[in-house]
Amino acid sequence: MLSVVEQNRLRISKNTPSKKKSEMGQFFTPVTIAKFMAGLFKYDSFKGSCHLLDPGAGIGSLSCAFLDRCVSEKFSFKDFNLSAFELDESLYSEMKASFSYYSSLFPLSYEIKGGDFIEKATDMIHKGYTKEFTHVIMNPPYKKIGSGTNHRYLLSSVGIETVNLYSAFVSLALEMMRQEGQLAAIIPRSFCNGPYYRSFRNFLLQRAAIKHIHLFESRNSMFKDDSVLQENVIILLEKGSKQESVKISCSTDDSFSDFREFFIPFKEIVSPYDRERFINIPVLPILENSGSISEELKFKNSLQDLSLEISTGPVVDFRLKEHLRKMPEQNTVPLLYPNHFQQSEIQWPQPESKKPNAIERNSDTERWLFPKGCYCVVRRISSKEEKRRIVANFLNPDYFNDFDAYGFENHLNVFHENKRGLSVALAKGLTVYLNSTFVDDLFRKFSGHTQVNATDLRQLKYPSKAALIKLGEKIDSVPANQSDIDNLIKKMGL
């Protein structure tokens, strides 16, 4: 039956306009992923009664994979109920045909429920229909929830504060599950860090234990038919259970042909000292080398400990458009964009670039400028082709001898000391450290997206200021070669 479901998925996905997929956050689950997720539920959970919830069910691929496992492994529930929620009524006939097939094989009671899941679920919670579901399997929609919307109001009414449909679906499902019930979900990795998902992380960790997280090394492997590049994880939660070590598994793609798994202590996934409750997922090299990430904890220093600050570039070009200039003129200073930093070198100005190269210095722009000095500059967005997520550059003031200030555009992050430059050695040492493979691995543990925000860089831990200065004093210029950078780090004992 799953082969038929997969054929239907490919056909419907191909014939569904991209606009509709985007508006509904609708990306159907491939059968290989569905079978893997159904296989995550522990064997002991297939006893007694089963009430399965599939919110945002689509054509029912996930439910069918769960039902298929019940048939193939000959599970015998006292009773089996399936509640599939789906907003798109055009998919109901596909679901009904699939569920009817399985109901002919074993006693299965199913209901396909229409309407908005958030509206339905919050209403159920208000009426006391909680602790109803024993199993949840979901591929929730991915779409932002605007402030002031009815969805935000309904979620707040049941104690849920979140900014995306996927985290809302997971939160609501947790509220409606029985103790020790299990939930398997495909969700974007974006919830692991950042301030926007702090409330969701707290909500999740207060109510459930993380049992298993699966990573894909290729970002486009999960929904490649729909050209989705959002980095996703598969997570298994168990409501109300004691948190123990977490199984971390990985594979290159959804064939799972090179599946590997490791057990990591929970304190290394979520640090007990982290108020943000970032979820740090170790990357493959760390797992293969030691199965532990404790070695990374040797650096304890925060930016505050180093008396350093990190700021997002304050120049938002469209807001200061009247003050921008294509090329430097009298009474202007350099305006630096990410494209001005290439392979550890500054390439400014760029006459052929569509971006301006200068900003007028006057009473309206002065507060957005940084004084002349040495800075470490990090791009906020790295391309998927780049090997490192963090790309840092040393800004040498000697390059700009004719200017005594700079403008940093909003797509850059700038390390500084009270909005002034760093010492030459500190700026060089910090740039080398941030460009190391060590830091790249560290960053990837808690960030699955290509954006590098100032908040992320504050979350990192750093060597002492003295160690960074010593590192910077050993080099004339910041090397561009990755092996040279990593060798410097090793030689310094960092």
Image (cartoon, rainbow, N blue to C red):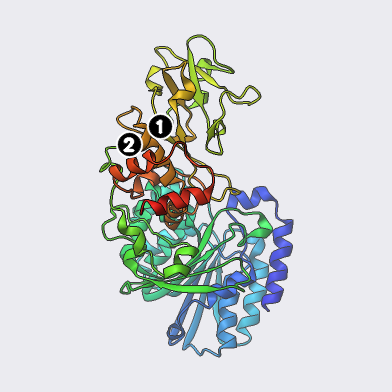
**For the point 59% across and 87% down, which residue is it?**
72
**For the point 60% across and 64% down, which residue is it?**
58
Q: Is residue 114 visible?
A: yes
Give the image location of residue 91, x and y in percent. Answer: 65, 63
Give the foreground label among 1 and 2.
Answer: 1
Question: Which image quadrant is residue 296 in?
Answer: bottom left
Distance, label 1 to label 2, CA atoms, is 11 Å
Give the image location of residue 438, x and y in percent. Answer: 43, 54
Going by the numbered disc 1, the residue's amino acid type is Tyr
Seen from the viewer's position, the closer of residues 327 and 243 is 327
Report whether 98 appears left or right of 162: right
Query: Mark 1 or mark 2, which has the lower sequence index?
Result: 2
Q: Is residue 358 above or below residue 4?
A: above
| Residue 309, numbered circle | 2
Q: Is residue 236 visible?
A: no
Would you call the spot at circle 2 few (<14 residues within 10 Å), some (14-19), or many (20 or more)?
Answer: some
Give the image location of residue 198, x and y in percent. Answer: 35, 52
**For the point 66% across and 59% down, which residue is it?**
224
Give the image location of residue 18, x and y in percent. Answer: 68, 50
Seen from the viewer's position, the closer of residues 420 and 26 is 420
Residue bearing the label numbered 1 = 375
Would you call the spot at circle 1 few (<14 residues within 10 Å), some (14-19), or many (20 or more)?
Answer: many
Going by the numbered disc 2, the residue's amino acid type is Glu
